[in-house]
Amino acid sequence: MREVLEFQEKRLQLTTNSSAYNRVIVSLAIWIRDMSRPMMVEGEFLKVIPYPLTINELAVSAGTTRETAGKVVRDLTDDGLIDFSRKQIIVYDEDYFLDFFI
């Protein structure tokens, strides 16, 4: 129970950050923690969110605009950290996102 409360407190602190860019990354990190599961992708096990989530939903979750959320997703995709498609989100570097909770 204590771990759950600590995580929820950390989640609240991180999602009230003044940087919209960081809030989008934290929202993705929370989605990864809550909804992803390991799946075989390109010959290796990666975390995948197997749901059709949208940029708009990410923007609402992060409390920012669709444009900002889209820019963050493009940057993360260009950096090879995720693949955000209409059917799923593939996470290539889970540690990058988990580091936001440390």
Image (cartoon, rainbow, N blue to C red):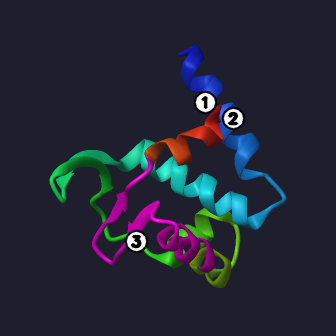
For label 1, the SS is helix
Residue 84: assigned label: 3
Q: Say if mark 3 contacts mark 1, CB within 8 Å.
A: no
Q: Is residue 74 magenta?
A: yes
**Residue 25, image x, y percentages:** 61, 58
Q: Is residue 92 magenta?
A: yes
Q: Say if mark 3 contacts mark 2, CB within 8 Å.
A: no
Real-space CA distance between mark 3 and mark 1, rounded to the nearest whole angstrom? 25 Å
Quarter-of-image position of residue 74: bottom right
Residue 7: assigned label: 1
Q: Say if mark 1 contacts mark 2, CB within 8 Å.
A: yes
Report the residue that reaches farthest toward the top: 2
> Dot 1 surroundings within 10 Å: few (below 14), some, or many (20 or more)?
few
Real-space CA distance between mark 1 and mark 2, rounded to the nearest whole angstrom? 5 Å
Q: Is residue 62 left or right of residue 43?
A: right
**Residue 72, image x, y percentages:** 61, 71
For label 3, the SS is strand
In primary-sequence order, the first of circles 3 and 1 is 1
Q: Nearer the viewer, mark 3 or mark 1?
A: 3
- The answer to whether residue 18 is above or below residue 66 is above
- Name the residue rendered at 37%, 49% in the picture: 35
The amino acid type, in three-letter code, at marker 2 is Lys
Residue 10: assigned label: 2
Q: Nearer the viewer, mark 3 or mark 2?
A: 3
> Dot 2 surroundings within 10 Å: few (below 14), some, or many (20 or more)?
some
**Residue 101, image x, y percentages:** 63, 36
Classify the position of the C terminus by image quarter.
top right
The amino acid type, in three-letter code, at marker 1 is Phe
- Name the residue rendered at 80%, 53% in the picture: 17
Which residues fall within the magenta stretch? 71-93
